[in-house]
């Protein structure tokens, strides 16, 4: 895949180690859930690199000084259901974040996203929005999510994924050049059922034991 400026691979050794646990078919559900949480934490730290900051004056116990703070409230948006597996890790680093929910599933016959639940904060334009979804396959679910968030007013959005496939990345980056995408893996292709290969299987099923 050619370099795409708004796609970022998170590939430090610790993230690669967590990804190895997630990819392994022998990893049981509790360990899978834990590794997903830990990877999410690392990815949130990476995604904050492009967050806007503001300078403020505070007093240390010794004297006044200028410090930097993230310039807006953060809204985390897990894409149900698998995105919930990334929420606790994200909240560990951003405990004051507001949480919105996008309920989408991918129709198994058509691989098209079907929306079933949306619950977002009012005034979404005031927030720095982080979308959480472990899998970016065809990109259909994510693109629909991003169009919905923008319709609701979101202007600053980044997306975090454990594993992404090249076709989905090319699609979402082309349709949403104003959004940054972070992934711990970039897999080359999709199989005939639009599953990412080699991937890690169905993240929702592995997180919640519905195998
Ligand atoms: C998975 C995944 C994404 C979507 C990716 O969810 O968590 O939301 O599929 O596929 P796409 O890029 O081709 O749209 P799934 O539909 O399995 O629902 P679940 O999270 O409820 O298991």
Image (tube, rainbow, N blue to C red):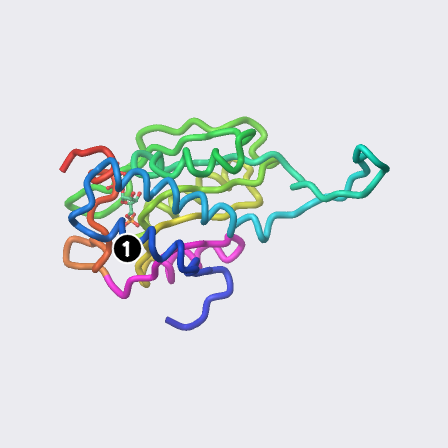
Q: Residue at x 39, y 54 (%)?
A: 15
SS at circle 1 = helix
Residue drawn at x 65%, y 41% is: 70
Evaluate whether residue 158 shows in this view: yes
Rendered-image quadrant of the N terminus: bottom left
Residue 190: quarter of image = bottom left
Q: 69 or 136: nearer the eye?
A: 69
Residue interval drawn in magenta: 169-189
Q: Give how far across and how far down residue 169 sits, in percent.
A: 37, 59
For ligand 1, the image quadrant comes to top left
Asked whether residue 138 appears in the rendered view, the answer is no
User: In x, y percent, where is residue 86?
Assistant: 38, 39
> How many marks do you count on the picture?
1
Q: Is residue 152 magenta?
A: no
**Residue at 41 percent of width and 33 percent of height:** 88
User: Most extreme residue toward the front, as rendered?
Assistant: 62
- In the rendered image, which residue does mark 1 sit on? 20
């Amino acid at each position: 895949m050619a370099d795409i400026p708004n796609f970022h691979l998170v590939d430090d050794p610790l993230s690669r180690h967590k990804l190895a646990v997630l990819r392994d078919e022998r990893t049981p559900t509790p360990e899978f859930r834990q590794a997903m949480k830990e990877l999410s934490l690392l990815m949130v730290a990476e995604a904050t690199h492009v967050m806007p900051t503001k300078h403020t004056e505070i007093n240390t116990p010794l004297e006044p000084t200028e410090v930097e703070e993230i310039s807006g409230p953060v809204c985390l948006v897990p894409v149900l259901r698998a995105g919930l597996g990334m929420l606790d890790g994200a909240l560990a680093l951003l405990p004051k974040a507001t949480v919105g929910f996008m309920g989408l599933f991918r129709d198994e016959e058509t691989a098209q996203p079907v929306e079933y639940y949306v619950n977002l904060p009012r005034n979404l334009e005031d927030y720095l929005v982080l979308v959480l979804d472990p899998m970016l396959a065809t990109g259909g679910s994510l693109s629909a999510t991003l169009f919905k968030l923008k319709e609701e007013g979101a202007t600053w959005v980044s997306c975090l994924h454990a594993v992404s496939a090249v076709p989905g990345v090319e699609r979402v980056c082309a349709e949403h050049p104003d959004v940054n995408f972070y992934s711990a893996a970039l897999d080359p292709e999709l199989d005939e059922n639009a599953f990412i290969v080699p991937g890690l299987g169905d993240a929702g099923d592995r997180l919640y034991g519905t195998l």
